[in-house]
Amino acid sequence: MGTVKELNQLEQSKKVGFIYLSQEDCIKAGGLDMKGTLGAIQKSFELHGSNEVIQPSKPVIRWGGPETEETRGRIMTMPSYLGGDLNVAGMKWIPSMPENPKRIGQPRASAIIILTDPNNGFPLAIMDGTIVSAMRTGAATGIAAKYLANPNSRTVGIIGAGVQSRTQLMATVGVFGNQIEEIKVFDLNREKTDQFAKEMTCELNVSVIRAESAEEAIRESDIVITATMSSYPYVKGDWLKEGAFHSEISFWDTDPEELVHYDKVIVDDFEHVKHHGVDVSYRAVRDGVIREESVSNLGEIITGKKIGRENAMQKILFNPIGMSIHDISEAYRVYLNAKKLGIGNDLSLWENPHWL
Ligand SMILES: NC(=O)c1ccc[n+]([C@@H]2O[C@H](COP(=O)([O-])OP(=O)(O)OC[C@H]3O[C@@H](n4cnc5c(N)ncnc54)[C@H](O)[C@@H]3O)[C@@H](O)[C@H]2O)c1
């Protein structure tokens, strides 16, 4: 029998609580601090490269074949665990509804993240994952560019003027700083492009100008980014200059045939890319344009297991599917900040469990 004090403590410890972080809370807790995000994503790539993560392939709800993701939409479920000194688990639930901006004036993507303490399985936080998701996608390109782009890169061409393009540029400038002299952006929506160029010029303190075509944005750019909702290919591999680094975060912009123009294809996790069955790196392997053995994961390059860029002339494609470990690493960073700053609402899962 324990003492009365011990019994009281046992009784009190039955409460399971967690914090809820709205999007506004995430921003207050440093969610838009790209330097912090780049650190969190570097860390998750390193853990991935040293096999210290658990990351099951993501189930996708879609209302038709893969091509309907860009029209009808989809919902992805993305769980993972990160070991090392992070030791945290979690899951992102992320619906993409392409008609939202036009139909109801709301973002295409919205996400919720659950963070879990792997020691007892209890929730640490339930939070908006929309900012986390966009920031980590930008940072993945930033970290890839740090390892794979030519270090003296000065010009960027980006296709798409949507949400992801913002964080793609924040991260690229976050890595290369004021070395970036000019950014050209092309989007089918001219008005949106002009607005994007104006806002990003102010935000990044770099000249962002509208290109009249995707070709114009891509030719002569040291770093090329494709981040659109295009449902058809339009990129030509021979538009890219020698030595260019291209990050394709969307799915249909580049035809698999075009990959003959690239010297290397790097992904974040080819098993996940294969499972999704949509990304151009997967379709190029499926169609016999490139060999699966020639595709490396970025974590393997970061941890020195594989070689990245070998000379200044190579054209390199980075084609990330987007990993849950990035979401959880970044969400955990924001969560720790929120705890330190007292941000968020305390909620309880239960005061006393109904069943034991
Ligand atoms: N790989 C990853 O980790 C990852 C993560 C998040 C999002 N994504 C993908 O990134 C893409 C962009 O997402 P978003 O949130 O920025 O979408 P968004 O709807 O905010 O913006 C997409 C933009 O693409 C433009 N566009 C469509 N077709 C075009 C074309 N042929 N040429 C030029 N512009 C075109 C649209 O006008 C729009 O401005 C989506 O496909 C999304 O699934 C990938």
Image (spheres, rainbow, N blue to C red):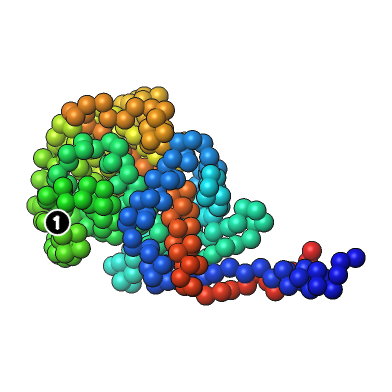
Residue pointed to by mark 1: 206
For image coordinates 22% across by 32% down, the residue present is 315
Q: Nearer the viewer, residue 212 or 336?
A: 336
Above or below residue 15? Residue 241 is above
Q: Nearer the viewer, residue 6 or 217?
A: 6
For image coordinates 70% across by 74% down, the residue present is 351
Q: Nearer the viewer, residue 89 or 130?
A: 89
Q: Residues within 10 Å of mark 1 (few under 14, many from 20)?
A: some
Residue 281 visible in the picture? yes
Above or below residue 66? Residue 201 is below
Whole-percent x, y for residue 112 in the image:
48, 63
Residue 237's quadrant in the figure? Answer: top left
Label 1 element class:
loop
In the picture, the quarter occupied by the C terminus is bottom right
Disc tally is 1
For image coordinates 21% across by 36% down, the residue present is 150
Whole-percent x, y for residue 192 in the image:
18, 63
Whole-percent x, y for residue 187 in the image:
18, 55
In the picture, the quarter occupied by the N terminus is bottom right
